[in-house]
Amino acid sequence: MTKQLLDYNEKELSQLAHKIVKDGQVVLHDQNMSKSQLVQACARFGNIESNEYFMNPVDAREISIVSGAVVNGKAIGMFGPTELEWHANGTGRYNFFEICVGLYCVTECIDTVLSICNQCDAFESLSKNDKEYYRNIDIQLDNNGARAQLWKDDGVYSVAYKTQGEEDFKVGSEVYKETIDRRPLVANHPVDGREYIYFMVPYISKALYKDGTEIENFEEFYKTLYSKIIKSKFMFHHVFRKGDLLFMDQLNTIHRRSAVKNKDRQLWRTAFDYSSVINYTHTQFT
C-alpha cells in the first residue's frame, strides 16, 4: 500500500522537500485525503498560504480550487478550461514566499497533460557568456500587460471568473497591490543556492541592464530567451489521476497544461514554504 504523506516522519518529510527542490517536482500517487488532511500535511512543510478568494472553500481557506466548472454562471475555481501559457503560481509578483505548490487530484481528466519546465537545468545548460549576459539583466513584470491578459482570456469562463470578483482579490481584509515590479532575471534559489532563470512568460514586459538602460529590441530578446529555456529536454509531463499529489517548486520551474476536456476536472491547490523542514531565510529570494 502506498505510504500516505500524513504518515511521513520528519526525516522523510525533509528528504521529500529536498527532492522537490533538486528535481523541481515530485509526484505522490494513491493519496487519500480530505481537505483538512491535505492542509495538515502541507502545513508540516512550513508556512501555508491562506486566502479568502471565491475559490477558497470556507472550511479550508488554505486550499484553492482549480477547475473549469461553471455553476449558475459563476466559476467555482481558478483558471479556465483551455490552454495556459507557461507560468508559475504566485511568481507573477515580486513579493511572495510560498514557493512550493501542491496539486491534489480530486476529479481527473485523462486527456489533460501538465508540463513542467525546469529553469535551473535550463540556466545550467547555457554557455558561460550567456550566463554572464543574463546575470546582468533585470526584468519588469506586468500582471495586466498584453501577454498576461491573453493567457487569462478564454471567453465564457473569463466572464464567469470575473463575476466572482477577480478584480477585487483580497488577502484578509486588504486588497492586494504589488509595489515592486522589477527584479533580477537570474537569481539563486533560497534552499540550495542554484541559479535559475526567472522567466515569467506572461508577465515580462521589459528588460533592462543593471545600469538601468532598457533593452531596445525587447521582442527579439524575449524570443531568444524563450528558445533557450523552453526545450523538451528540460521538461517533465504528467497526467493527473485521482489521488495524485504533485509538488512543484515555483522558482525552479514553470508549467502549463493542455486543454481540459472534462470541465469538472478538479485539483486542490496549496502553496507553502519549506521553513519547517529546511533551514533557509526568505532574504535569499533576491
Image (tube, grey):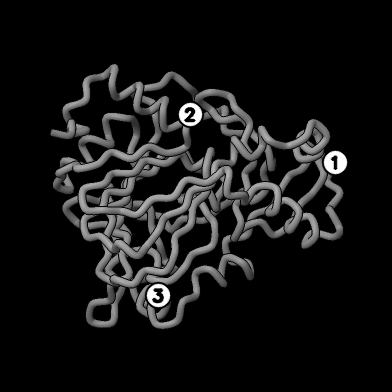
Quarter holding the N terminus is: top left
The x and y percentages for residue 247 are: 37, 40
- Judge the density around disc 2: few (<14), some (14-19), many (≥20) Cα neighbours within 10 Å: some
Total numbered badges shown on the rendered structure: 3
Residue 95 seen in render: no
- Judge the density around disc 1: few (<14), some (14-19), many (≥20) Cα neighbours within 10 Å: few
Which of the pair 265/56 is nearer the observer?
Answer: 265
Q: CA gap, disc 3 to disc 1? A: 40 Å
N-terminal-most mark, 1 or 2: 2
Which of the pair 235/101 is nearer the observer?
Answer: 235
N-terminal-most mark, 3 or 2: 2
- Judge the density around disc 3: few (<14), some (14-19), many (≥20) Cα neighbours within 10 Å: few
Q: Is residue 179 above or below residue 44?
A: below
Which of the pair 184/32 is nearer the observer?
Answer: 32
Q: CA gap, disc 1 to disc 2? A: 33 Å
Q: Which residue is mark 3?
A: 162
Residue 157 seen in render: yes
The x and y percentages for residue 161 are: 37, 73
Q: Residue at x 40, y 58 (%)?
A: 113
N-terminal-most mark, 3 or 1: 3
Q: Amino acid at mark 3?
A: Lys
Q: Amino acid at mark 2?
A: Lys
Q: Residue at x 29, y 17 (%)?
A: 11
Q: CA gap, disc 3 to disc 2? A: 37 Å
Q: Nearer the viewer, mark 1 or mark 2?
A: 2
Q: Is residue 234 left or right of residue 37?
A: right
Q: Are marks 3 and 1 in contact (CB under 8 Å)?
A: no
Q: Residue at x 37, y 37 (%)?
A: 26
Q: Which residue is mark 2?
A: 22
The x and y percentages for residue 252 are: 53, 38
Q: Amino acid at mark 1?
A: Asp
Q: Which residue is mark 1?
A: 211
